[in-house]
Image (tube, helix red, strand yellow):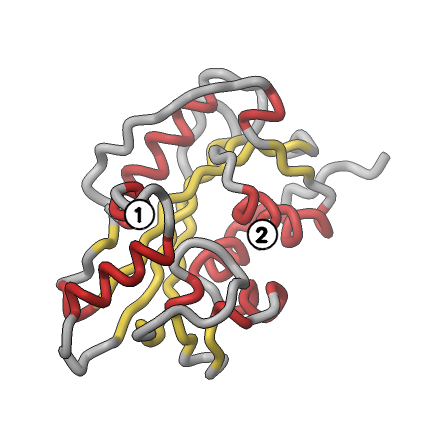
Amino acid sequence: MKMNKQILIATNNMGKREEYQSMLAPLGFEIVCPKDLNIALDVDENGETYRENSYLKAKAFSKLVHLPVIADDSGFEVEALSGFPGLHSARFAKEYGNDYERAGAALNEKLGDNPNRRAKFRCCICFLKEENAEPLYFEGEFPGIFLKGSHGTAGFGYDPFFHSEELDLDMGICPEEKKNAVSHRGKALRKLLAYLGENRPAAE
């Protein structure tokens, strides 16, 4: 089965785009975003799980393009806050003008003096080869510690507030290559890569 060399990622987040492109480029795929194709679509992510939300996005965009579509939903879960903000991570940040420095500080206020600072990122990727194809799901988790304050400016979103247990390194100062090796999205992506590797584009 041959696959188009271009794949649409259902987001205009440049951080995500770079992360996907860096990992998919070796297989010959090129990532394009909705704005590259002059598509303006705001999908109502009203699912109750990461899987449902990723499918809603993938399905909506696959109706508009003749390309395979990748959509993911991810969240930052603080254990002592019963997994909050989780599915609502982006919406929580939006309450603070998409300023994740302020959103992270607000989460710290909610946590207060609770000594349990365990947290994790979770990601679910939905891949649709075409609109009516069976959706494929690839998931990953990234355990660690929620920092009391941000450290560094690397990554995006809540990264500067997160310490990776696997790397023993704060994500705000972590090189992208190291982050991709252990991150929630990196783990889910490697599962997707294993699938796509069997469907590598034909050589020019």
Query: What residue is drawn where x is 35% and y is 75%?
Result: 144
Kindly state the secondary structure of the residue where label 1 is placed.
helix
Residue 19 disc label: 2
How many residues crowd mark 1 within 10 Å: few (<14), some (14–19), many (20+)? many
Quadrant housing the N terminus: top right
Q: Where's residue 112, x and y in %?
A: 15, 72
Question: Which element is circle 2 on?
Answer: helix
**Label 2 neighbourhood size at 10 Å, few (<14), some (14-19), many (20+)?**
some
126 over 80 or under it: above or below: above
**Picture residue at 73% right of the left edge, 52% below the top:** 26
Instruction: Tell me which amino acid carries mark 2.
Output: Glu
Q: Amino acid at mark 1?
A: Ala
Please name whichever residue, 192 or 184, is drawn nearer the observer in this view of the structure: 184
Mark carried by residue 93:
1
Residue in view at x 48 percent, y 33 percent:
10
In this view, the residue in front, 120 or 81, is 81
